Image (tube, rainbow, N blue to C red):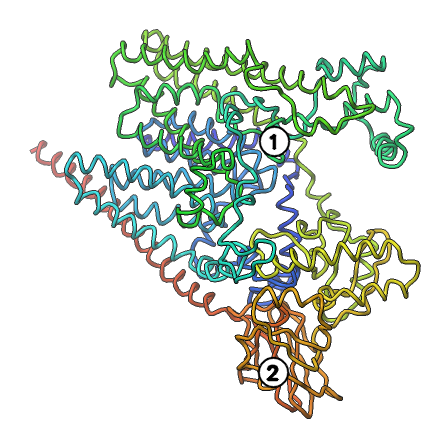
Amino acid sequence: MKKYAPHFVAVLVFLILTFIYMSPVLQGKTIFGQDTRSYIGMSKEAVDYNATHDEQTLWTNSMFGGMPTYQISMDQPSSILKYLDTCLRVLPGPTYRVFLYLIGFYILLLAFGASPYLSMGGAIAFAFGSYNLIIIVAGHNTKAVAIAYMATIIASVFIAFKKNPWLGSAMLALFLGLELYANHVQITYYTLIMVVCFGVSELIFAIKEKTLPRFFKNIGILLIGAVLAVGMNATRLITTAEYVKATMRGESNGLTIKGSDSHGLDKDYITQWSYGINESMTLLIPNFVGGASSGTLDENSNTAQTISELTGYKKTGRDLNKSEKERLDNILQNNPDNFQAKNLTELMYSFNLPLYWGTQPFTAGPVYVGAIICFLFVLGLFIVPVRQRWWLLAAAVIGLLLSWGKNFMPLTDFFIDYVPMYNKFRTVSMTLTITCLAMCIMAILALKEMLSDNLSDVVKNKSLYIAFGIVGGISLLFWMIPSLAGDFISPNDQSFTDSYAFLQETLPLDRKEMLSADAIRSFAFVFAAAIVLWISVKRKINTKWVVLVFAVLFTADMLPIANRYLNDSNFVSTRNLKNENKPSIADSYILNDKTLDYRVLDLTVDIFNSSQPSYFHKTVGGYSAVKLRRYQELIDVQLAPEIMRLQKELSTIRSEQDADSVFMNMNILNMLNTRYLIYHPSALPLLNKSAFGNAWLVDNIKFVDTPDDEISLLSETDLKQTLLVDKQYASECPKTDFETGNAFIQLISYSPNELKYAFKSDTPQMAVFSEIFYYKGWQAYNGDKKLPHIRANYLLRAMYLEPGSYDITFRFEPESYNVGNILALISSILLTLAFSYIIFAKLKEKRLKILVNQVKKTSSDE
């Protein structure tokens, strides 16, 4: 039991530290980031359905006309990971993620041979890196959990190569499985890059040491674990792999209009968030480029002093109350001529200013890995054993270079064009997660070496002086000459004119001082760490005290910077969240319409980047990084231009009849059955009487040769009468002209994964459904008989119907989901058996040792 005491202490320390840092959770508060808001909106229909039905829906109509829930809210009922993940989530909200950071890195350092208490200090340094906390504030919850499991995956692979390949493989199955279950494939991809770096290093040493058979044996055993991890996530992975081919991340369907003929994501889109080359210095100096895109300045800043000089008005010493802020907003929005000096000062102290001057569109904060970590990382380049040193350096450098994205296109182009799957991911600055993890591992391994007897004092001192000279020197240099970083001018500064013109001069000065202040701060921590190590080398302090001091230094270095971006102000009361999605007047009016199925266009939000309206309505917009490619193309070529034209024409209407005339010419919105338009939350919505409805019968079919023809003709064709069909479906259309007469088709039953229509006609008909076509799952039936349906009008469903009176039922039944469930169940059973065997073998070994000791004792007594 004594042997496990340090681990219990570690867990207790991590829990205490987590709850101290996130103490508002003890008051019933939580963090409600933007991505969390988005998730709640986009998943509402599916979550509500799942709560009242035995089966879950795999399709939702709440966004972009309709899409699978695979990457929104889909459960994996056959996977044991579902239950393990639930057990791990006993801690409330954000505390769970911080605790995972700590435990994950702690396990990694133990695997690398660090002592429990050194591992504790290292875990604190890693967990409170600024990026890890910033993503929690933003609501990037799956990313945070996936990052936490990065460390345990590296630990598993290391154990497989250095200690026990079967134990490492079992651990890999568990932790890779949990990371995949977290559902952030991009982070898993980056974890693989680190594993490849380690694997290449081991391969080189295996060749040198002539141990290739053992190397490939370890690889084979690890692959078993990886296969189990993938198998336990087969439900989501198989369905997503199938779906992604039809999304904007998949292959082109041949459309060339607006440059849509591409594979994967567009390079500009991939590299939009690229870390600046000089911005990389934030790893050492957090405010190197101003910190977050917006922030506050204190009363001693140049901006504050200038305001005081211009106005003679001093800081109020308090935050403005609600009425004061509303008054300022009213002045700014509606009556800027009444904006006086006092208003300007109040605004200065109450609202954020643009402090970031880097090259990214905007940022919530810098990636700060820690001044002490940077110092120890450089120290590690001289003293960490070669076998670990070079692969960690390679991983750190690769992560850094890839994060530069458009600022270093030779490497970025190579990865996008030639490295499998790399072109499926955007926000390349995220590769800094590789750099941060590699630097933290190297740093703690360097500290471990400095506290061991593996190196002579001469080597330790020489390496210490060089590392301090490099890292401390850089920090000191930027403190003394901050202008080396650049001109501190943001492109956005030019927007400050008239009363705000002085900000063009004061903000660069304040940014310069922010850099200088953080530079001397970093130097102080580097100096403190170097002094402690120097004293340690002189044998004037016990190793245990050195470890404790470094744990304190890590905490003192990381927590204040983390607190800039995640602090008490980011927490909200869970009671207040009940009103977060309170329906507006417009929403309430629409919700009173009990028509089975229709769509809504909400002009009060960023239509194609907000899932807020989806909380209440089925919408033509939404927010998703994996929307169907055809829908994105429809947005680009037809829908977005049509909405712009609609807004322009609606601004001139004077009567309901005028509005009706405008809606009549909105082909795309009408075929999507857009029944309501919200133009102001406090006003009644506009009713679109021209919406085509859930289904309609056309008079004729027009075949098209290319995707370009089909999407272009949407705005030029009377879609109520004519159906545009790709010529590939010609065999499914026995006729091209129809007599609709008294024939009718009507939706009679709706649920997100099943729609039932009543049809009656004396003659054959061609029906069009205002639902999104996705052939990998949607099946149509007349009773038990399957009915073929085709894609038409670029992305809708259509069906040739024989005469008669019968019901037509569409059901979403992806076979990939059923296959995935079977594989997940089999893999879960195998993992359970594997760990049961390991535990049984361990207990058997322990009992055998006890028995041997008893026999020895009996023999000695005789």
Say which residue label 1 marks.
566
Quadrant assignment, res 708: bottom right
Quadrant assignment, res 213: top left
Q: Residue at x 42, y 32 (%)?
A: 437
Q: Is residue 188 in view?
A: yes
- In this view, the residue in front, 373 or 451, is 373
In the image, taking residue 418 as reference, residue 855 lies left or right, namely left
Mark 1: amino acid: Leu
Q: Label 2 neighbourhood size at 10 Å, few (<14), some (14-19), many (20+)?
A: some
Say which residue label 2 marks.
800
Name the image quarter holding the C terminus: top left
Image spot of residue 518 (x, y percent)? 57, 17
Q: Secondary structure under badge 2?
A: strand
- In this view, the residue in front, 773 or 642, is 642
Q: Which mark is in front, 1 or 2?
A: 2
Residue 475 vs 775, above or below: the answer is above
Mark pair 1, 2: CA separation:
57 Å
Image spot of residue 303 (x, y percent)? 74, 17
